[in-house]
Image (cartoon, helix red, strand yellow):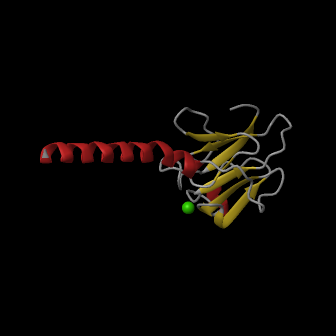
């Protein structure tokens, strides 16, 4: 009887953990609003989560974030690009426009903003280009 109670408690705990695992990434990663300090036409990165800390904003491409002190700093980002056909932002893990698979961290469509980058993206961005498609 005691063992059965323990088993039931463990099963309930496991279910609870499962639910947390499924819901947490979605809640952390998505943002439905554009940060107000990211001007129209720009791709913006932020040193901190939730679009906080230092911000860097670019209307054009940047093949090396080290020049502006932004290398490996982005913890949140937003694409406020104008959808003129070249509004997808490809973000790269390394400097230079190396389009090899594995170097691409993310592709953001116009209006996409992420307040909390996950561990594989956080503090990794080093360059970006504006592209026609993801
Ligand atoms: Ca950071």
Q: In which image quadrant can residue 45 be found? A: bottom right
Q: Residue at x 53, y 48 (%)?
A: 121
The residue positioned 74% from the left and 47% from the top of the image is 61
> Which residue: 77% across, 58% down?
38
Q: Position of residue 80 (x, y in %)?
A: 78, 49
Q: Is residue 15 left or right of residue 74?
A: left
Tell me: residue 52, above or below residue 6: below
| Residue at the extreme bottom | 53
Q: Quadrant of the N terminus?
A: top left
Q: Is 122 placed left or right of 8 in the picture?
A: right
Residue 58 image point, x, y percent? 76, 54
Residue at image location 83% in from the left, 34% down from the top: 85
Find ligand 1 in the image and state its quadrant: bottom right
Which of the 4 image quarters holds residue 98? top right
Q: Where residue 26 sits: x, y (%)?
A: 55, 45
Relative to 70, does residue 131 appear above or below in the rendering?
above
Instruction: Report which quarter residue 103 is drawn in.
Output: top right
Residue toward you, 2 or 71: 2
> Seen in the image, is 35 located left or right of residue 117?
right
16 vs 123, nearest the viewer? 16
Residue 101 horizontal/vertical position (percent) = 55, 32
Does 85 appear above or below 120? above
Give the quadrant of the C terminus.
top right
């Amino acid at each position: 009887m005691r063992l059965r109670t323990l088993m039931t408690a463990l099963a309930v705990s496991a279910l609870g953990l499962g639910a947390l695992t499924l819901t947490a990434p979605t809640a952390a990663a998505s943002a439905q609003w554009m940060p107000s300090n990211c001007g129209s036409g720009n791709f913006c990165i932020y040193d901190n989560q939730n679009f906080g800390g230092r911000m860097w904003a670019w209307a054009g491409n940047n093949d090396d974030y080290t020049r502006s002190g932004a290398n490996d700093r982005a913890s949140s980002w937003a694409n406020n690009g104008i959808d003129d056909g070249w509004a997808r932002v490809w973000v790269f893990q390394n400097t230079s426009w190396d389009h090899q698979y594995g170097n691409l961290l993310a592709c953001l469509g116009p209006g996409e903003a992420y307040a909390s980058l996950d561990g594989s993206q956080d503090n990794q961005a080093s360059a970006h280009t504006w592209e026609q498609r993801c």
